[in-house]
Amino acid sequence: MTTTTTTTAGGVKVVKPTVGSHLNDYWGRVRGGDLGTLPAVLGLLVLSLIFGVARDTFFSALNFANLFSQGAQVIFIAMGLVFVLLLGEIDLSAGFASGVCGAIMAILLTNHGWEWYTAIPAAMITGIVIGFVLGFLVAKLGIPSFVVTLAAFLAFQGILLKLLGGGKNISITDTFVLKLANSNMSVSVSWIIAIVVVVAYAGVQLNNVRSRAARNLVTDPMGIVLMRIAGLAIVVLLTTGVLTQERSINPVLNSVKGVPFVAPIIAVFLVVWTFVLGRTTYGRHVYAVGGNTEAARRAGIPVDRIRISVFVIGSFMASIGGIIAVSRANSVDPNTGGSNILLYSVGAAVIGGTSLFGGKGKVINAVIGGAVIAVIDNGMGLMGYQAGTKYIVTGLILLVAASVDALARRRAASTGNR
Amino acid sequence: MAATPLLELSGIDKSFGPVQVLHDVGLSVYPGEVTALVGDNGAGKSTLVKCISGIYTIDSGTVTYDGNQVAIHSPRDASALGIEVVYQDLALCDNLDIVQNMFLGREKKRGIVLDEPTMEQMAGDTLASLSVRTVKSLRQLVASLSGGQRQTVAIAKAVLWNSRVVILDEPTAALGVAQTAQVLELVRRLADNGLGVVLISHNMNDVFAVSDRIAALYLGRMAAQVKTTDVTHSQIVELITGGRSGNIGLPPEKPSDFGGEIVDITPGGDK
C-alpha cells in the first residue's frame, strides 16, 4: 500500500486516504476491538439465511412487512436507550414507561374522547416527565441509575395496573392511531419516499466531500463515498421493492402492499437523533460525558444537565414505542411494555454495537440490533418454537453481544483504540 | 528579556481548614519565558496552580495579570483571561478525535450545526504552529495516540484559544526518552511564541533543559525564584529539600517554628 501524504489546513502533514487505506483502517479498527455494527450486520445475515432455508415463508413479503411492526416498539425504545447507555447509565424502566405512556394515550382516546392530536402529545409529555424525574434522581441525588430505574420499573408496572383499573384491557378505535402500526403507504408514495431518501443521503454525502475539499481538508476517498451511497440505495430500494409487492393471502378481497407507516417513522427518528448526536454540540457533549466525565466537567460542559437529558430522551422514545405498541395491538393491557420488551430493547442497543460501558454507540445500532431481535423472534416463531426456547435463545444472544462488547473493550484497551 | 511579568502573584495564602498549605507565596511569570515550578511532594505546587486556574479561591494575596489586578473565582475566569492549565491526567476524551477534543466545550457552530471544517482547520493551524510532526489524521481517536502525542494534543488544546499563560503539570512524567524530548521542545516553542509558560516538574534535567527561571516551593513557601543560569543543579535540589541554599532561599528558621513536626504540613498538597 502506498501512502501519499497530503498537507491539510495549516500545513500539518497527514496521510491522504485512498480506498485501500480506508478499508485497511476499518479492518484495523475492527481487529483492534472497535467492532461497531459489524457483528450485528453479520448476525442479521446469518440468522436470515438460517431461517430462510428452514422456512420458505420467512422471506415472503408478508413476513418481511411483519418484521417492521413486530420490531418497531423495541427499536424505538432502544433508540432512546442508546443515549442512556452512551453515558454508561441504564434505564430498566423504559419498557413499563412505554406501557404507561401508551395507556395514557388509550385512556384519553377511549375513556375521555380526546383526539389523536392531543392524546399522542399527552403520551409524549408523560414520557418526558418520567425521564426528567429519573434523570433528576440520578444526576442530582446521585442514586445509581440501576436502582432508580429498577424502582421505577416496579412502580410503573403498578401505575399501569392502576390506570387500567386493576388489569382491564382498553381498546382503541381512533383510526389515525390504528393506522400507525397497521397500515401501509400506497405503492407510489412508498417509491417517492424511498427515492427521496436515497437522493437526500447522496446529496448530504457529496456535499460534505465538496465543502471539505473546498477548504482543503482531507476528504474520504470518492470510492468509499460512492460505496456508501450505493449500499444505502440497494438496501432502501430493495426493501421498497419487496414491500410494494402484493402480500395479501387473498388479493381479490383485500389488497395489501406498500411500505408500512412505521418504516418512515423509524427513519425520521433515526435521522433526527443521528443528526443530534453527530452534528450538534449537545451530541458531542453526550459523547464527552460518556467518555470522560471529568474532562467534560473541566471543559465547562454541564454534566448534570446532560445526564438528565439522556433520561428524558430515553423515556420520550419509550413513549413513542408505547404509542406504536398500543396501535399494533389495538389496545392496551397490563403487560404492554412488560414481559421481554425492556430486555429486548437493551439487547437491541447492545447487539447493535452500543457499549454498556458508555461513550460508544450510534442510533443506527438500535435499528440494526432491533432488526436482529425481531428476526430471532419472528424466525423462531415460524419454526414453531415455544416461548421458552425463544427466551433462552434471545438471552444467549444478548449474552454473546455483551461478551463481544466486553472483550472488544478489553482488546481495544490493549491496542489503544479506546 | 521582558521586564514586566505577565502574571504576578504576591502574598498568596491558602488554607484547608486548619492546615495552611500556602504561606505568603509570590510568583512571577514572564512572557516568552519558561518558569519552572519545582518543589517536593506536598510543597504546594498543585495547590498554587489550582489557585491560579480558579479551582481554588485564594484566602489572601493579589493576582496581577498584564498589569491589572484580577480576581479569579472559577476556571472560566482563568480561561477568559487567557490562562490555561494542562493537567497531569490531560483531561482528554478517549472516544473523541483530536479536533473534537481540542474544541471540547467550546465548539464552533454554524446555526445549530457543528462547524467541523472550521474546527478542523483551526486545529490544523494550531498544531502546525507548534510544528507538530505527522499525525495520521486529525480525525484520529485520541485513544489511538501515544503518550507524547496525547500530551501534544492537550497542549495544543490549551494554546488554541490565544491563551497567554500556559501551565503544564508534569507534562513528561509518564513519557519515554524520545517523547520527553519532543514535549520539552514543544514547551520551549510555546515560550518562543511569546507565551508565559509555567512548567511543573520533578525532573531536574527537564527543568534545566528548558526553563529560564526556576521557582522553588518549600513547605508552602516560595523559597526562591531565580534565573536558571544563576544556579546549579545541586543548589536547586537544596532549595527543594531544605528551603535554602547558601545565601538564597528562605531565612534560617528557628527550630521552634517547626517543632520537629515538618511532615504535618502536607495534606491537600500534591496528588
Image: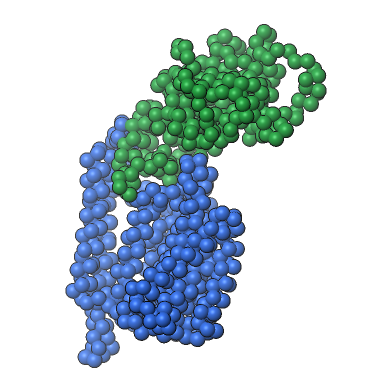
Look at the image and tell me in which quarter the C terminus of chain B lies.
top right
For image coordinates 47% across by 75% down, the residue present is A99
Q: Nearer the viewer, residue B83 or A110?
A: A110
In the picture, one chain is blue; tell me its letter.
Answer: A
Q: Quick check: can you spot residue B151?
A: no
**Residue B33 to residue A187: above or below:** above
For image coordinates 54% across by 29% down, the residue present is B52
Picture quadrant of residue A268:
bottom left
Q: Nearer the viewer, residue A61 or B260?
A: B260
Q: Is residue B270 left or right of residue A323?
A: right
Q: What percent of the width, then of the height, locates residue B263?
A: 75, 28
Q: How is the image coloured?
A: by chain
For image coordinates 37% across by 59% down, the residue present is A273
Look at the image and tell me in which quarter the N terminus of chain B lies.
top left
Q: Nearer the viewer, residue B181 or A185?
A: A185
Chain B, which colour? Answer: green
For image coordinates 26% across by 83% down, the residue present is A256
Q: What percent of the width, then of the height, locates residue A27?
A: 39, 51
